[in-house]
Structures are given as structure tokens and as C-alpha cells.
Image (cartoon, grey):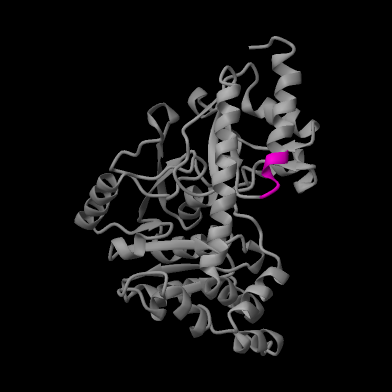
Amino acid sequence: MKLTEPWSKKHKAVTKHGGLPHNLSNSFAQPLTMGELLRLTRARGDEALLALYEDHDLGYTPNGGSRDLREAIAELYGPSVGADDVVVFTGAQVALQTAALALVDETAHAIAFAPGYQSVLEAPVHAGAAVTSIPLSPANGWAVDVAAVLNQPYNPAGTLLPKDVFAALVELAREHGIWVLCDEAMADAYERGLSCVTMSKPWGAGGATIGWLAFRDPTLRQRLLDAQYFGTACPSRASEIQALMVLRASDAILEKNLAIIRENVALVDAFVAKYADHFEWVRPRAGAIGFVKFKGPLTSTELGDELACAGISVKPAYCFTADADIPAAHDGFRVGFGEAKMPAALEALAAFVEARFVDAGVV
């Protein structure tokens, strides 16, 4: 079928493809540098991995990823997930597409949240399936009806399901034999669950271009490899070794990133409280993103355009829905607070609000 246009296409054009001085829209954690990664590897005396990176073979890697990386990824999960229950991709975007091709066809029906990340909502459509979008709203804290599919932490709002709701949803899926694709722990929680993960979250290593699917169903690996064959079948060995470096230094990296996130989310909290006449949000519980509702007088599209002219990038609501008329409850923007440079961008936003709305007496 014909692929749809990216919802964020306008955003990229408006924000000069990331060329603005301030960016409040990124969803990843503080990006690592290669120098930092090498220092962490040397500090723990991992000379073998350093030597492997310096002198690795530039031949093709195995379809689905090399075993040493798959073993390291499997250690993130419980005993039911082993190296053969992991398929590595060149990022999570490709993983989502491959999972859709492997699991659904024109006879299938998929369920997804809206607003949401476009690939989650449309990858099943590209594979030929019908998709039901279940609308969520900040009015009830982005709460999830149990008859839904998962996205944890929910993008763009950064919310999590309560444990009892999560358990009820897994039980509902088990009763009906439904595949559930989600982030993080789904492979541990459910025998037909798939965990879709990328190195950008939470490690800040998006440039390594490594993502994966972890699962427990033994029939799934070959189906995924067959679908992957027609896409980007082999990640680069350099990227795999970078991912190994990240995972072996995971504790130190996550400690640093969590400190940044905790400081930044407190700053956004204070911003929303100070400018409560214009903004509100459901405080995120996980990840490095949240969804800030803008109360007007502009639409989020108009606000995004004006902010871009002021050198500030945000992701308005149209980046997360195909609806031409965005419901009032969804009219806001995603804010990312995982980077060390985020406070400067938030200060620029506050200066814009003061000049555009507060000093002008606009409500």
C-alpha cells in the first residue's frame, strides 16, 4: 500500500530540520559522546572490548544481530528471555515495522493509542491490517481503558499504567491470544509480549542506531528474521560494539541521566505552575518526555510556528495525530527534558511567554 506522509514533516520544515538554537522537543536522554563511552570502558578495565572496537571485522553481521550483543541484551530481562529471544535492528523504528510485517496481515486487527507515535499507529496499516485507535485524554490523567494496547512510558505524555491495570490488560490479551508490543518489560510479563527498545532511551545512544525486540514465544524469531530480510537485515559491527559498551556501563550512564531528568522535570513543573494561566500538564512518571497542554489563545500549531520564529523547537499536537481537527484536550505540545541543555531552552520559552502573553496582558 502507499505509505502515508510523516506527521512530523511540517515540524521538521518549520524548525529548519533541527537548526534552531533551542530544542524542547527531543525525547531521548542526554547523548553520550564516543570519548565518554571509551573512558567508561577503560575505567572498568574492559580491554578486550576496546581491542574489538579498534580491530573488528567489517564483514556482514548475522541477521538479527551478533550473539554477544544479544546475550548482553537478554541480561536486561528475566530468565525466560535468552539470546535467541532477541532480534537486533538498526533502531526501534525498523523494529516496529518488522514486527508489524511479521505479526499482522489483511486479516488482522490492531489496537493502538492516540495521540501517539506515528510508527506505532501506522506500521500495522502498512502491513495491511485494520487499526482501531483508542483516544486518551489528559482530562483523566491519560488513563487507559483495559481494552487497549500498550506504550510504556506513553509517548507523548510520559505516563505509566498502574500495576493492576497493566495486569488486567495482560490477562485480557492472554484470554484472547493477542500479541502485545510495548516498551521495556512486556517480554517478561507476557508469553506473547514483545518489548521494543532503542538505545536512545534511556541511555542517550541513539547515534549507535541499535534497537531490538525481545520476546518469549519460540516461534517468533524466524518470523521476525524472515520479515527483517527485506529491510535492514544487518546492523554494523561498530554499532553493535558501541551498544555493548553502553550496556556494560549502564549503571553509570543511567545514574547520570536520571540526575539530569529529575532536575529538569522539576524545572518544567515550576514553569507550568508559574504560567498556569497558559499551560498545564499531567506530570510524567517515567522517561524524559511530557505533554504540556496550551490553553490558548493560539492553537498548538500556531504556537509552534511562533516559537520556531523565536528560535525554539517544540513538537505540537499534529506530530502525534492524523486528525485535521485536533481535539481541544490534545492541543498542546511534547516537551523533552532529558538533555543537560534543556534549562536554557526552557528559559527561552519563559522569555517568549513573558513577552508574548504576560506583558501584553493576553490570556
Nearer-the-camera pick, 91 or 202: 202
With 168 as the anchor, is 130 left or right in this view?
right
Residue 246 visible at all = yes
- Of all residues, the one furthest to the top in this rendering is 361
Residue at the spot x=70%, y=90% of the render? 55
Q: Is residue 153 above or below residue 141?
A: below
Q: Main secondary structure of the magenta part?
A: helix
**Residue 300's image quarter?**
top right
Instruction: Locate the N terminus by quadrant.
Output: bottom right
With 292 as the anchor, is 174 left or right in this view?
left
Residue 240, x across and y down, in percent = 59, 77
Instruction: Locate the C terminus by quadrant.
Output: top right
**Residue 206's image quarter?**
bottom right
With 282 as the anchor, is 7 left or right in this view?
right
Could you tell me how many numbered marks the image carries?
0
Residue 150, x across and y down, in percent = 38, 49
Q: Is residue 210 magenta?
A: no
Residue 322 visible at all = no
Nearer-the-camera pick, 178 or 143: 143
Residue 153, x across and y down, in percent = 45, 48
Residue at the spot x=37%, y=78% of the render? 82
With 225 as the anchor, is 268 left or right in this view?
right
Q: Is residue 250 above or below residue 259?
A: below
Nearer-the-camera pick, 231 or 22: 22
Q: Is residue 150 above or below residue 73?
A: above
**The magenta segment:** 340-344
Residue at the spot x=45%, y=63% of the render? 99
Residue 221, x across and y down, in percent = 40, 75
